[in-house]
Image (tube, helix red, strand yellow):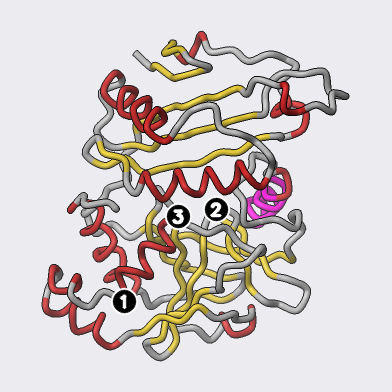
Amino acid sequence: MNLVFLNGNYIEKKDANISTDDRGFHFGDGLYDIMLVHESVMVDFNLHYIRMQNTAAAIYLKLDYSKEEICTICSNLIEKNNIKNGRVMIIISRGNSNRWLTDLASISQNFLIEIQDYDCKVGQGDLQFVSLKSYEDIRWKYRDIKITSLLPSVIKRNEAFNLGFSEVLYHDEDGNIHETSRGNIFLVKNNIIFTPPLSQNLLPGITRFRLIELIKNKDYHKNLSINMQEILNKIEIKEENFTLSEMYSADEIFATSATSRVVGISKLNHIEVCNFNITRVLLSLYDFYVINGKYS
């Protein structure tokens, strides 16, 4: 059984259909969010919902379902599909209409929630690696809202893949780093972790936010091994801009996202990266948070 929730109904995914007049199909007129599920519990649901609210407000879309209703629907799908570990995908388009319609408030949105069975290997210490190809950012101006119009990233990721890379790193014309096509970026230099400050240039990642909070919370570090605590006690984190050229001399580079959590960057363009000592500790720190399960 593979049930999804579509426009008020729990139905088999194979039976889920949306009109050919859907504005998401015609214009990419919609939003989405993805959450990690661990031991049948959504990680940081409240923060993800707030981001959905902010995105909806930015595109003048009033959500048809409340926070409580969305939480209940997700929990029901997790139970009905017997999902232990996986990811929640919420996709909301503005709805069906004549493409020339200007009264957008009169449209009933298409509201889809799907739970995918996916083992993220939380707590297994299995650091994943990706390689980055850098490109000047060609996306639209408001990159800080999570909309479904992702064609620029599709184009650039395809180019990067054909060159042997697994992911895209975006920067502006002066080389200032924004983010990857699927997450936030960090570099480590002399025990200082840098990540670009929030702006219209990058998405306010939930994992980014949570990891920064965990790094700053010295009391929380006591949950880890003595060796990990010693490493964490030596580092600090700064939300500051940096350039592509500065990344080439970094000690470590890593990225964060909801389901990948913390991934090591093993290659940036022509430069190989070999050190992941701090990155591995940060993965363990974040995974302990996920396993502990006390989400605010």
- Amino acid carrying label 3: it is Ser
Q: Earlier in the sequence, mark 1 or mark 2?
A: 2
User: Is 163 rendered above or below residue 199?
Assistant: above
Q: Is residue 152 a member of the stretch shown in magenta?
A: no
Task: Give neighbour class at mark 2: few <14, some 14-19, many 20+ (Cα, 10 Å).
Answer: some
Q: Residue at x 75, y 58 (%)?
A: 141
- Amino acid carrying label 2: it is Arg
Inspect this view and state whether residue 165 appears: no
Give the numbered dot on residue 257: 3
Q: Residue at x 70, y 21 (%)?
A: 107
User: Is 103 rendered above or below residue 154?
Assistant: above
- Amino acid carrying label 1: it is Lys
Mark 1 or mark 2, which is nearer to you?
Answer: 1
Secondary structure of the magenta portion, mostly? helix
User: Is 144 rendered above or below residue 186?
Assistant: above
The residue to which callout 1 is attached is: 216
Which residue is most to the right?
Answer: 100
User: Is 14 rendered above or below residue 93?
Assistant: above
Inspect this view and state whether residue 280 appears: yes
